[in-house]
C-alpha cells in the first residue's frame, strides 16, 4: 500500500537569485494524464547553480528573461515512486502505483515547430522541470509530472540512489552521439564532472583509438580512468595541447568535447583539435566566451556542434546503469537531506570536494 498523501510538503522554493527557502508547499493533485511522484532523490546540477546565481538566459522571444521563473521549485534530476495518478493516467501512461519512475527534464509543448518535427528537446516553450513555473521541480517531497511529460520506469537493477544520475548520463550520451566518433579517432573530453565522466563512459562504448580525459583534479581523473579513459591529463601540470599533438604525430585530436564550463577549455580545444575535427560544446557557461574564430574557419575548417539535453537517450542511460558500466559509488559523492540544500549548492559551486551531490526529501 502506498502511504497517504498529505496536504502540504517540505519544498525548496526559489524566490529570487540566491534566495532559496525551505517552505511548506501544497502537494499538487494530479489531473487527467498527470502523475504524482513521491521524490526519493534529486541531484543538484551546474544549471541549478546558474539559476541560483540569477544568470541571464537568452531563449525565445524574451531576451531579458532570467535563467528561471521565480517562484519555482528547482530540481530536474530526480527519481521517485508513483504516489497518485490522474483519472486517465493509469490507462494512458503505462504506470501504476509504486512504480519507480524518472522523467525527461523537458516537458515538450507538442505544438511548436520543433515539437511537430519530432525535435522536442528544442521545444520553443521549453518547460524544463525546476526552471519554469509550468513544471515545478523535485526538490520537494512530491513532484507532479505534467500530461506531456516523457516518463520511464526504472528497473530493479538500478539502485534508487543511482537513478538520479540517469538525467546527466543521458545528456552525456547525446553529446557523444553528436561527436560521431569513429574507431580510428583520438577523442579528448575536457572536464570530469558528472557530465564529463558520463561522456567518457559513453565514448568508451564507441571504442576510439585513443580516449583522453582532461581535468585539473587528479582525483576526478582517476574516476575517469575507471570510466574507460585510456589516458588522463591534468592541464594544470602539463601542456595538454602539446601532449595531445605529440601523441597524434602533430595533428591533434579528431574529437574534442567541452564539458568544463570554463572559457579556457574552449580555447584549449580549438588549439588541441586537428584540421577537419569535430568540436562539441555542451557546457553551461557562467560567463561569455571569446575565441579566435579564424581557427574554426580559415585555419582548420572545424565542425562545431552544440549538444542540448538528451533526446531519446534515457533508455540508453538506464541500460548503462543497469549493466554497472560506471563507478557510481565514486561519482555520487554526497547524499544530503533536503534541509541541507544550501550546503549542497555550496558544494557544487566550490567544485573541489564533490562530483555529484544529491538531496533526499
Image: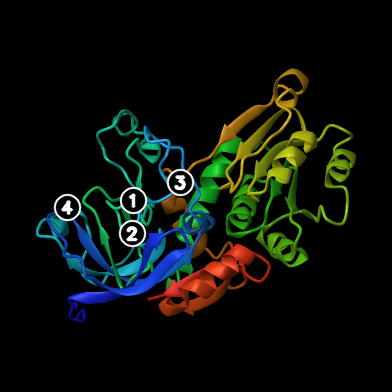
What residue is drawn where x is 40% and y is 42%? Answer: 65
Secondary element type, mark 2: loop
Say whether disc 2 or disc 1 marks the residue closer to the N-terminus: 2
Secondary element type, mark 3: loop
Q: Which residue is mark 4?
A: 92
What residue is drawn where x is 20% and y is 65%? Answer: 28
Task: Please give the label number shown on residue 72.
Answer: 2
- Distance CA(mark 3)–CA(mark 4): 23 Å
- Distance CA(mark 2)–CA(mark 1): 7 Å
Say whether disc 4 or disc 1 marks the residue closer to the N-terminus: 4
Q: Is residue 360 left or right of residue 238?
A: left
Q: Would residue 328 be seen by someone viewing this image from the given angle?
A: no
Say whether disc 2 or disc 3 marks the residue closer to the N-terminus: 2
Q: Quick one: 114 or 320, which is closer to the camera?
A: 114
Q: Quick one: 183 or 46, which is closer to the camera?
A: 46
Q: Which residue is mark 1?
A: 132
Q: Quick one: 223 or 238, which is closer to the camera?
A: 238
- Distance CA(mark 2)–CA(mark 4): 28 Å
- Pinpoint residue 119: horizontal percent, then vertical percent: 37, 34
Amino acid at each position: 500500500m502506498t502511504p497517504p498523501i498529505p496536504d502540504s510538503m517540505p519544498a525548496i522554493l526559489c524566490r529570487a537569485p540566491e534566495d532559496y527557502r525551505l517552505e511548506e508547499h501544497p502537494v499538487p493533485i494530479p489531473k487527467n494524464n498527470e502523475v504524482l511522484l513521491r521524490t526519493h532523490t534529486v541531484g543538484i546540477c551546474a544549471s541549478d547553480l546558474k539559476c541560483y546565481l540569477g544568470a541571464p538566459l537568452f531563449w525565445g522571444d524574451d531576451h531579458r528573461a532570467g535563467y528561471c521563473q521565480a517562484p519555482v521549485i528547482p530540481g530536474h534530476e530526480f527519481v521517485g515512486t508513483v504516489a497518485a495518478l490522474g483519472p486517465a493516467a493509469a490507462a494512458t501512461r503505462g504506470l501504476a502505483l509504486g512504480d519507480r519512475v524518472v522523467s525527461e527534464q523537458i516537458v515538450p509543448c507538442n505544438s511548436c515547430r520543433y515539437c511537430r518535427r519530432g525535435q522536442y528537446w528544442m521545444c520553443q516553450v521549453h518547460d524544463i522541470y525546476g526552471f519554469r513555473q509550468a513544471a515545478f521541480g523535485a526538490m520537494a517531497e512530491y513532484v507532479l509530472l505534467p500530461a506531456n511529460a516523457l516518463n520511464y520506469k526504472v528497473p530493479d537493477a538500478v539502485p534508487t540512489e543511482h537513478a538520479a544520475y540517469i538525467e546527466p548520463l543521458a545528456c552525456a550520451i547525446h553529446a557523444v552521439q553528436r561527436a560521431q566518433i569513429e574507431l580510428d579517432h583520438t577523442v579528448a573530453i575536457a572536464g570530469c564532472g558528472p557530465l564529463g565522466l558520463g561522456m567518457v563512459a559513453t565514448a568508451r562504448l564507441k571504442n576510439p583509438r585513443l580516449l583522453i580525459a582532461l581535468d585539473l583534479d587528479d582525483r576526478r581523473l582517476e574516476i575517469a580512468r575507471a570510466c574507460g579513459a585510456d589516458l588522463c591529463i591534468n592541464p594544470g601540470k602539463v601542456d595538454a595541447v602539446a601532449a595531445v599533438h605529440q601523441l597524434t604525430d602533430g595533428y591533434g585530436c579528431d574529437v574534442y568535447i567541452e564539458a568544463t564550463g570554463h572559457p579556457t577549455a574552449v580555447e584549449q580545444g580549438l588549439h588541441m583539435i586537428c584540421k577537419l575535427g569535430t568540436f562539441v560544446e555542451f557546457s553551461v557557461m557562467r560567463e561569455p566566451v571569446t575565441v579566435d574564430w579564424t581557427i574554426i574557419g580559415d585555419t582548420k575548417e572545424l565542425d562545431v556542434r552544440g549538444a542540448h539535453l538528451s533526446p531519446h537517450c534515457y533508455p540508453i542511460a538506464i541500460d548503462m546503469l543497469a549493466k554497472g558500466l560506471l563507478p557510481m559509488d565514486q561519482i555520487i559523492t554526497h547524499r544530503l537531506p533536503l534541509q541541507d540544500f544550501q550546503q549542497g549548492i555550496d558544494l557544487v559551486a566550490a567544485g573541489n570536494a564533490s562530483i555529484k551531490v544529491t538531496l533526499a526529501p
